[in-house]
Image (cartoon, rainbow, N blue to C red):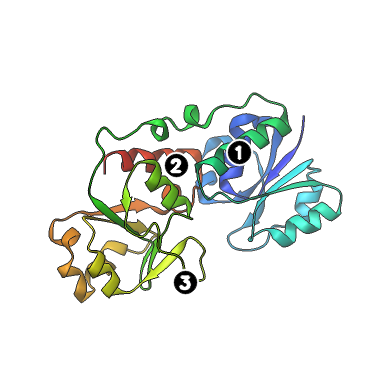
């Protein structure tokens, strides 16, 4: 049996679904801690700290999966020791399907189609809505995903008219655009999706004086979505939850 250490919650979830016995090491993510099926796995990283290389080596893995950008240094060190690594970057549905296939092939198990794991993501909205939408990840600065992000790709998948999709990023985050309050007022979307990152984003947003002039605020079309699923894929269940909410938007 191949032994795999996964450094993200999403790769841990995928490996566990495809071949539970292969997964030996996981990150200390709250998405995994709450699940019984991960309780016997060794935690090799905590929070934003770099993973513990010694701990990873001690697990004698055949493969280590990490996130591009975030785990580059660790993956380089591990690879130097002759252990195979895969650096993942999930920006759209195709990336996720490709990764699922890559892990299945590596573990020599049947590839479970993603749609069977996340059934809501295979549904299409009953009607094509003409409503316009803007997603805000933070209220100051106003950060919004374009079509080069995972969030933007999910919105497109459900034919949601994301007014920011074609605006190119001048922010430090590829796939995200910093909006001015003026731009938000000018775009004036029918719906605004706010991302819940633990602080009460909706209250924070509504305390800004300009928001009372927005159509979405006047019509009470302000929706709160979980950070995991829409912004950071996080896990298959979280992605499925996000798809379920987007169908109804």
Residue displayed at 40% across by 41% down: 157
For disc 2, the neighbor class at 10 Å (few under 14, some 14 to 19, many from 20) is many
Q: Secondary structure at mark 1?
A: helix
Residue displayed at 46% across by 38% down: 237
Per the image, the residue denoted by label 2 is 239
Q: CA distance from mark 1 to mark 2?
A: 16 Å
Judge left or right: residue 105 versus residue 187.
right
Label of residue 171 in the image? none
* Pick the front one: 188 or 56: 188
Per the image, the residue denoted by label 3 is 170
Query: Does the image show residue 39?
Result: no
Which of marks 1 and 3 precedes in the sequence?
Answer: 1
Q: Quadrant of the C terminus?
A: top left
| 184 up-or-down from 37: above or below | below
Q: Position of residue 125 (x, y in %)?
A: 30, 35
Q: CA distance from mark 2 to mark 3?
A: 27 Å
Residue displayed at 65% across by 29% down: 19
The reply to whether the C-beta atoms of the residues labelled 2 and 3 are less than 8 Å apart is: no
Judge left or right: residue 137 versus residue 133.
right
Q: Closer to us: mark 2 or mark 3?
A: 3
Residue displayed at 42% across by 66% down: 177
The residue furthest front is 166
Query: Does the image show residue 128?
Result: yes
Judge left or right: residue 116 versus residue 140.
right
Per the image, the residue denoted by label 1 is 98
Q: Quadrant of the N terminus?
A: top right
Q: Position of residue 210 (x, y in %)?
A: 20, 74
Which of marks 2 and 1 precedes in the sequence?
Answer: 1
Q: Position of residue 13 (x, y in %)?
A: 57, 39
* Pick the front one: 18 or 181: 181
Q: CA distance from mark 3 to mark 1?
A: 29 Å
State the count of labels.
3
């Amino acid at each position: 049996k191949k032994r795999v250490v996964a450094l993200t919650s999403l790769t841990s979830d995928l490996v566990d679904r495809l071949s539970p016995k292969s997964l030996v090491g996981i990150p200390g993510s709250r998405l995994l801690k709450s699940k019984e099926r991960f309780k016997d796995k060794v935690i090799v990283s905590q929070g934003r700290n770099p993973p513990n290389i010694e701990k990873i080596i001690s697990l004698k893995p055949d493969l280590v999966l990490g996130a591009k950008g975030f785990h580059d240094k660790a993956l380089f060190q591990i690879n130097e020791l002759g252990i195979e690594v895969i650096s993942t970057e999930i920006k759209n549905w195709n990336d996720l399907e490709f990764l699922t296939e890559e892990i299945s092939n590596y573990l020599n198990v049947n590839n479970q189609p993603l749609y069977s794991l996340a059934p809501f993501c295979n549904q299409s909205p009953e009607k094509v809505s003409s409503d316009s939408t803007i997603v805000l990840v933070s209220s100051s600065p106003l950060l919004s995903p374009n079509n080069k992000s995972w969030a933007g790709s999910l919105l497109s998948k459900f034919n949601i008219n994301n007014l920011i999709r074609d605006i190119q990023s001048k922010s430090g985050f590829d796939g995200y655009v910093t909006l001015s309050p003026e731009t938000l007022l000018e775009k004036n979307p029918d719906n605004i999706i706010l991302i819940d990152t633990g602080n009460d984003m909706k209250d924070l947003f509504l305390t800004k004086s300009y928001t009372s002039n927005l159509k979405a605020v006047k019509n009470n079309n302000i929706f709160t979505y979980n950070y995991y699923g829409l912004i950071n894929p996080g896990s298959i269940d979280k992605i499925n939850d996000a798809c379920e909410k987007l169908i109804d938007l």
